Image (tube, rainbow, N blue to C red):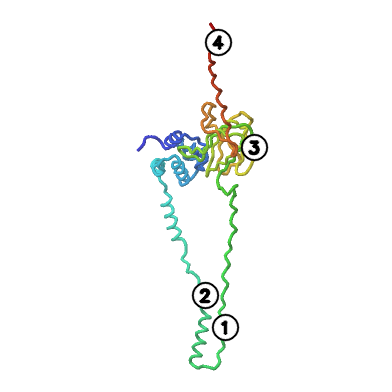
């Protein structure tokens, strides 16, 4: 068995990704203070072992750890649940204390049985010749079945373009800007785009859970989130890194990543469709060597 505590294993796995507690909270839907408490081996942040083990398993799976091993280690240290034994004891006590009640027959069943008995008596009387015309049996009353009520379905949130996730539209309105976009929170990272976009270029980036953006010239870029225009994110010449998750209404600054300096910004240069890239200037003509001047010979 490992000598490292549960919280220490969780923290080491998160730092090896690397990822912040905020990113882990967005991915696992567990509060940041709960994740921080688990990494400190403090599991009293919420009452109920089922909730603690559930959040512990979810965090371990996201960190690529064996969640069953983490849960077993937690039970070994803090004790396994006694809920099954308690539930069995309560069930036995309830069975002893509750009186036995015989089910009652519904009234419509009794009425139907009486009507069938009357019909059988009349049919038997007619077969034995007990009379001439026999009156038709009365119709058996049938109680109408209750109509089931169907609740209206809850409205499903709609996203621009029918995409149920996060979608960012980027338009370069002035000059140009280098940009790097990462889709999702996977390891290794899935780079959706990296390069320089010239004025007039528009790109749309989508992801199921989140997007990360690095922009070198905020004043030259106009951003729309799920169809909502957010405008420029900053002044011209200023760079910034942002992160946006599914359900967010705006882009959040991402302090965990920074825009690289100009000498380290790799990627192609993208021009608007229909406009060819500028041609390089033609090379300067090489100088032609001058021929030596011939001196005419004088006649002898």
First along the sequence among labels 4 and 3? 3
Q: Is residue 253 visible?
A: no
Between disc 2 and disc 3, whose residue precedes?
2
Q: Is residue 211 left or right of residue 75?
A: right
Q: Residues within 10 Å of mark 4 (few under 14, many from 20)?
A: few
User: Marks 3 and 1, Cα distance to the nearest angstrom?
Assistant: 79 Å
**Rendered residue at 54%/12% (across/down):** 294
Front residue of this view, candidates 183 and 149: 183
Front residue of this view, candidates 148 and 197 = 197
Marks 1/2: CA–CA distance: 17 Å
Dots 3, 1 in contact, CB < 8 A: no
- In percent of the image, x 47 and y 34: which residue is there? 18
- Residue 162: x percent and y percent? 58, 49
Is residue 180 visible to us here? yes
Label 1 crowd bin: few (<14), some (14–19), many (20+), radius 10 Å: few
> From the viewer's perspective, is the residue at label 2 or at label 3 nearer?
3
User: Which residue is labeled 1 in the image?
Assistant: 138
For the residue labelled by badge 3, is the local secondary structure a helix, a strand or a loop?
strand
User: Which label sits in the foreground, 2 or 4?
Assistant: 4
Cα distance between the residues tagged 1 and 4: 148 Å
Camera-side residue of 18 and 199? 199
The label nearer to you, 4 versus 3, is: 4
Residue occupied by mark 3: 231
Label located before the other in sequence (1 or 2): 2
Task: Indicate the position of residue 282 as horizontal and vertical percent values.
Answer: 56, 27
Position in image of residue 145 (x %, y %): 56, 70
Residue hosting label 2? 109
Q: Quadrant of the N terminus?
A: top left
- Residue placed under numbered mark 4 in the picture: 296
SS at mark 4? loop
Q: What label does residue 284 carry, if any?
A: none
């Amino acid at each position: 068995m490992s000598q490292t505590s549960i919280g220490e294993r969780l923290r080491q796995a998160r730092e090896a990704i690397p990822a912040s507690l905020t990113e882990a909270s967005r991915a696992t839907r567990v509060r940041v203070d709960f994740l921080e408490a688990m990494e400190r081996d403090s599991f009293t942040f919420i009452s109920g072992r089922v909730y603690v083990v559930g959040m512990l398993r979810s965090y371990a799976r996201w960190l690529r750890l064996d969640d069953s091993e983490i849960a077993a280690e937690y039970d070994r240290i803090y004790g396994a649940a006694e809920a099954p034994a308690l539930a069995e004891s309560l069930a036995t006590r309830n069975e002893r204390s509750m009186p036995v009640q015989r089910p009652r027959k519904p009234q419509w069943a009794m009425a139907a049985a009486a009507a069938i008995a009357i019909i059988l008596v009349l049919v038997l009387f007619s077969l034995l010749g007990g009379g001439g015309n026999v009156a038709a049996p009365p119709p058996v009353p049938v109680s109408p079945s209750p109509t089931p009520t169907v609740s209206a379905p809850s409205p499903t949130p709609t996203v621009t373009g029918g995409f149920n996730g996060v979608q960012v539209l980027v338009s370069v309105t002035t000059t140009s800007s280098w940009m790097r976009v990462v889709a999702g929170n996977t390891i290794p990272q899935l780079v959706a785009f990296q390069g320089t976009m010239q004025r007039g270029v528009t790109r749309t980036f989508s992801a199921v859970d989140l997007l990360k953006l690095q922009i070198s010239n905020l004043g030259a870029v106009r951003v729309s989130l799920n169809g909502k225009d957010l405008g420029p994110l900053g002044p011209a010449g200023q760079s910034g890194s942002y992160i946006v998750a599914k359900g967010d209404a705006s882009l959040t600054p991402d302090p965990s990543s920074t825009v690289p300096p100009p000498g380290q910004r790799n990627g192609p240069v993208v021009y608007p469709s229909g406009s060819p890239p500028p041609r390089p200037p033609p090379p300067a003509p090489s100088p032609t060597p001058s021929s030596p001047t011939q001196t005419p010979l004088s006649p002898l």
